[in-house]
Every structure is written in structure tokens, then in C-alpha cells.
Image (cartoon, rainbow, N blue to C red):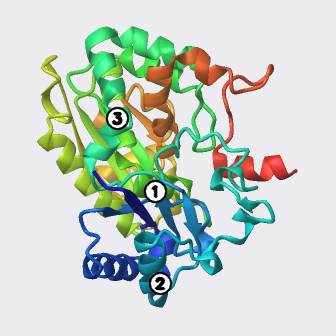
Amino acid sequence: MYRSHVLVCGGTGCTSSGSLQIMETLKAEIDKNGLSEEVSVVQTGCHGLCALGPIMIIYPDATFYAMVKNEDIPEIVSEHLLKGRIVTRLLYSETVTPAGIKALADTDFYKKQHRIALRNCGVINPEVIEEYIGTGGYQALGKVLTEMTPDEVIQTLLDSGLRGRGGAGFPTGLKWKLAKGNDADQKYVCCNADEGDPGAFMDRSVLEGDPHAVLEAMAIAGYAIGASQGFIYVRAEYPIAVQRLKIAIEQAREMELLGKDIFGTGFSFDIDLRLGAGAFVCGEETALMTSIEGKRGEPRPRPPFPAQKGLFGKPSILNNVETLANIPQIILNGPEWFNAMGTENEKAPRYSLWEAKYIIQD
């Protein structure tokens, strides 16, 4: 049992600012001071405050250090971790008030956020499946496979009001219902993680910080529509996301959360990666599926729609990362929980948290 946990951001923003070197120095300094049995260093995904990186948060007191430099590490270890004295000069300025240190959750950036898709980002180590499981991970998949029929899963999504977060806003449950209604010897679940929009990094943040949420949701989708194979189409320019997806898939296979006979229910589902080459057009679902097939990524005429004739000519669904990341929580908490977060005229939270930040300010 550790008395302190030091969370260091390992997302793209902080990594580019030197957070990996900071973690190595931190571990060495902790060992040097004889604290290895008392202090745990945890690499997390993105916290969302990329301009303040490298970011470090020390629990249980939730001390938030911003713009940490490698040369700051000896002081943090000797003062904070060894003697219990906060290094005030490194604190994020907004957390310092005349009344004392403000909790990070009470800062302007965080206080109006209610995280669903990003609930584990910046909290768990995305490369350790046990940490995802410890936050309730894969419980939704277990519930679906042992307590719900495919039709009940689809109806839950329809009732929740979840719509595609990739921009089109098409009802997710309806898309799954259409695919389930088409019989075939093989069906596919695809995840659009290409995120070709300039400056758009919400999908990258989920993939880097909580990849298992996407894998779990895809397996749920496979059960709902009758698919046994999934593909994640992720842009090659996201090397950290790609690496963590590879780790997550292997870990899930080792724990038999992907593969054959999941939870001993007879349901089989596996996931493979396909890397995009930076073609913006592959954000369109039929072009993406064509690219997965190894062909030039060009859109196909519709109809037929992917639910009828998609990947490799078989019924297929495609959802983006943020859409999928909401699904396990909807299954566990119920459609009413998700539905209640919308407005009277627009049920369910329509916008991503990154968009909501600007809406709140307006």
C-alpha cells in the first residue's frame, strides 16, 4: 500500500514537453531517497491542460504542479514526498488563493465539466488493464453478455439518445438496429479514430488515456449486431495512441476479454488495428472502410449503406472514438442517466466536453 501516488501526464502534449524524462528522473530520485515502497509513480493520459505541461499531480492531497522541469524533481521529492511540504512555486497559479490551496476540480477549467468519455483520462495508467478494471471497466460488457439480449442493448442506446460524436449526429442505437436487421455470415464493427480535422484532439485524448473504454464498447457493439470482428482505423500520426491501443488489445486478449468465448458465454469478438496515412477523406465512413480493405480510400455511392453492405461487402457499423467511449457508462448507469444530462428539447449531452468548454464561456 503506497502512501502517495504521483500522477505524471503521458499524453502527447506533456510528452513533447519532456514528461517521460521527468518520470525517469522522478523514479530515480524516489529510489535514492528510499521511498520506492511508499510512493508510486503513475503515467496517465491527458488532463486537458496541455499549455501547463508537463503536469504532475500528487495524491492523496491532489497537489497540482504545472510546467514541471527536470531540475525541479529533487526538490519535489525531498520537500513534498519526504517532508510533506508543498513546493508552492510550482503550483498551478489558479489553485493558489488567499484562503489556501484550491482543489483542481474547483478551477475554471474543470468545475463545470462532467466527464463521461474522458472520465479516466488523467486518472489511470492507460497501459495497465487492471487500473481500468478497478474503475469498473469491462463490467458493462459482462452485464451485456450475461443479462441482456442484443435487442435490449440496442434499445438502451435508443432510449439514451446517444448520437454520433463524429459530427453527423446520427442516432447510434438506430445505426446498430439497422445493422442487426441484416443477416450475413459475417458482420463488422469499425471505429473511426482517424480524426483528420485540424486541431481536433478529443479522440486522441481518449485513445491515449483510456483505450480499453473503446475496446469494451466495440465488443458490446459486436454482440448487439452479431459481429465477431472489429477494426480500429487510427491515424499513424498518433504514435502514442497507436502504441497504447496495441498494448490494450494484447492485455484484453490475455484476460480473455477479447477473442473466443468471452465470459464463457459463447460470444467471440476480436479487434485489429489499421493505420491511416493522413487522408482527410478517410474520415467518411465508406472511404474509411475501403481503406481498411487495402484500396484507395475513396467514398462509395450510397445506397447501399454500410449497415447493408459495408466492410468487405458485409453489414457493418462505424462509430467514432468519443461515441464509443460513452457506451459502457450508458450500459452501467442506464439510458435515463445519460438522457437526463441534455435539455428539454435536446435529450442527452450533445456536445463533447472540449466543445462544451466554449459553449459554457459563451
The residue most toward the bottom is 71
Residue 75: give its label.
2
Considering every residue shown, the one lying at the far right of the view is 362
- Residue 47 occupies quadrant: bottom right
Q: Residue at label 1?
A: 194
Q: Which mark is residue 91?
A: none
Tell me the element at label 2. helix
Q: Which residue is mark 3?
A: 137
Q: Is residue 360 left or right of residue 134?
A: right
Asked if labels 2 and 3 touch by Cβ distance under 8 angstroms, the answer is no
Q: Secondary structure at mark 3?
A: loop
Assess disc 3: are there few (<14), some (14-19) or many (≥20) residues with their C-alpha within 10 Å of its C-alpha: some
Which marked residue is nearer to the observer: mark 3 or mark 2?
2
Tell me which label, 3 or 2, sits earlier in the chain.
2
Q: Is residue 32 above or below residue 237?
A: below
Residue 294's spot in the image, x, y percent? 28, 56
Callout in the foreground (2, 1): 2
The amino acid beneath tag 2 is Glu
Task: Give coordinates of residue 32: x percent, y percent.
Answer: 26, 82
Q: Mark 1: few, some, or many residues within 10 Å (few <14, many ≥20)?
A: many
Tell me which numbered mark, 3 or 1, is placed earlier along the sequence: 3
